[in-house]
Amino acid sequence: MNIFKTISRYFAACVVVTLSACSADIDNYQASTPPFNLFEYFDGNVKAWGMVQDYSEKQTRRFEVDIVGTIAGDELV
């Protein structure tokens, strides 16, 4: 049973290290221009489209949306 715990801990540590290596550092993008302003981007008519893929990267769905954003005070509705 002791060897199982050791292997499990080693595997968990490998998973944590692997996942943390895949993450991007947000500081790399903080100075990018132009700065993203959520309110300006979604104010008015916005058209968006995309797709959903399964685990094997096979496309399973496509979608298209029309968004009408309005700013009311300090909220985007």
Image (spheres, rainbow, N blue to C red):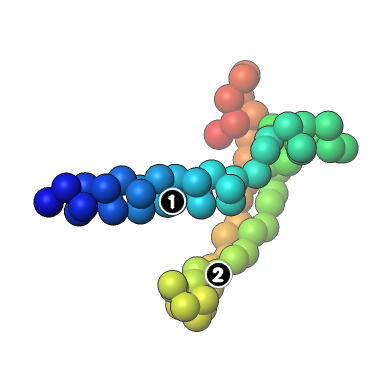
Quarter assignment of residue 26: top right
Viewer-nearest residue: 72 or 57: 57
Viewer-nearest residue: 4 or 40: 4
Q: Which numbered disc, 1 or 2, marks the residue closer to the eye?
A: 1
Name the residue tied to disc 1. 14
Q: Quadrant of the C terminus?
A: top right
Q: Label 2 sits on what residue type?
A: Met
Q: Label 1 sits on what residue type?
A: Cys
Name the residue tied to disc 2. 51
Secondary structure beneath dot 1 equals helix
Say if 53 sits above or below 28 in the image: below
Report whether 46 appears left or right of 64: right
Say if 76 sits above or below 7 in the image: above
Report whether 12 appears left or right of 49: left
As drawn, the residue found furthest toward the right would be 33
Neighbours of disc 1 within 10 Å: few (<14), some (14-19), many (20+):
few
As drawn, the residue found furthest toward the front would be 3
Q: Measured from the top left, where is residue 48 in percent x and y?
A: 64, 59
Q: Residues at badges 1 and 2 in contact (C-beta under 8 Å)?
A: no
Report whether 72 appears left or right of 29: left
Viewer-nearest residue: 48 or 35: 35
Q: Residue at x 28, y 53 (%)?
A: 7
Quarter assignment of residue 50: bottom right
As drawn, the residue found furthest toward the left would be 1
Res 31 label: none
Q: Residue at x 55, y 69 (%)?
A: 51
Neighbours of disc 2 within 10 Å: few (<14), some (14-19), many (20+):
few
Q: Measured from the top left, where is residue 28 in percent x and y?
A: 76, 37
Looking at the image, is mark 1 or mark 2 earlier in the sequence?
Answer: 1
